[in-house]
Amino acid sequence: MGGNGDGDGDGDGESGAVTVIVRVRPLHLTNQAHDDVCRISDNALVLAWTHDIANYAYLPPASYTFQFDRCFGTDSSQAEVYKRTAQPAVNAMLEGFNATVIAYGQTGAGKTFTMEGIPGDREQRGITPRAFEGIFEHIRTCADPSKIVVRASYLQIYNESISDLLCPTPERIGLAVREDRLRGLHVEG
């Protein structure tokens, strides 16, 4: 994402910067007895487990700290995550820069919830609907919106297969990455 990692939402960070952010999802009901294993401290994710938990997980007791540009705990709202992560990228895009937001993680980590949210629940909208809302709100305020072109991709890479999530047809699965002189690197279709 563009920005300097301060996440203040003003989009004034250095262009081309990559910001790495982690969001911790709530634990599954079966694991809630171990909710102290993962905690956020400043911009660090701390994983620590005691002997009791280590026996449960077949691991020796340990503690690990991982630094990120920003960390969000289980109590973070969708609005806060958008404002502090994707909104600077959207603002940079509105200034003419390319912008990318990538959600990465294992199955069940919360990528879809973070990116899409809960349909029909305005408070639980994810990054994607909030970004599109911000883009089209900006267009409505422009002097001549008929001269604005919006191009967006919403792709999923799963098991080494690329899918277009904006296209509701079966042809959206198994797309190929191509490169040519005119278009450069692109996803076909």
Image: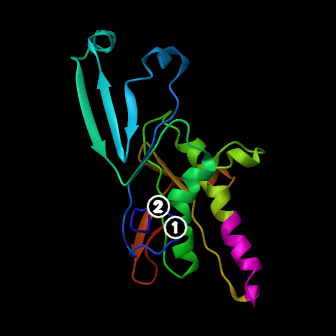
| Amino acid at the residue labelled 2 | Gly
Q: Residue at x 39, y 60 (%)?
A: 19
Say which residue appears at 38% left-offset and 73% top-offset: 16
- Circle 1: element type: helix
When asked about the image quadrant of residue 90, the answer is bottom right
Density class for disc 1 (Cα within 10 Å; few <14, some 14-19, many ≥20) is many
Main secondary-structure element of the magenta-colored stretch? helix
- Kind of residue indicated by mark 1: Pro
Q: Where is residue 184, by image quadrant? A: bottom left
Label placed on residue 88: 1
Q: Is residue 95 above or below residue 10?
A: below
Query: Where is mark 2, residue-wise?
Result: 7
Up the image or down, 15 lies above or below 166; here it is: below
Q: CA distance from mark 1 to mark 2?
A: 7 Å
Is residue 58 visible from the viewing direction of this image?
yes
The answer to whether 16 appears left or right of 10 in the picture is left
Identified at 21% across, 17% down, the residue is 60
Please provide percent x and percent y for residue 39: 39, 33
- Cβ atoms under marks 1 and 2 closer than 8 Å: yes
Q: Is residue 21 magenta?
A: no
Q: Quadrant of the N terminus?
A: bottom left
Where does the image place residue 62, in percent across and percent down from the top left? 22, 24
Q: Which residues are magenta?
A: 133-146
Relative to 167, is 18 on the left or the right? left
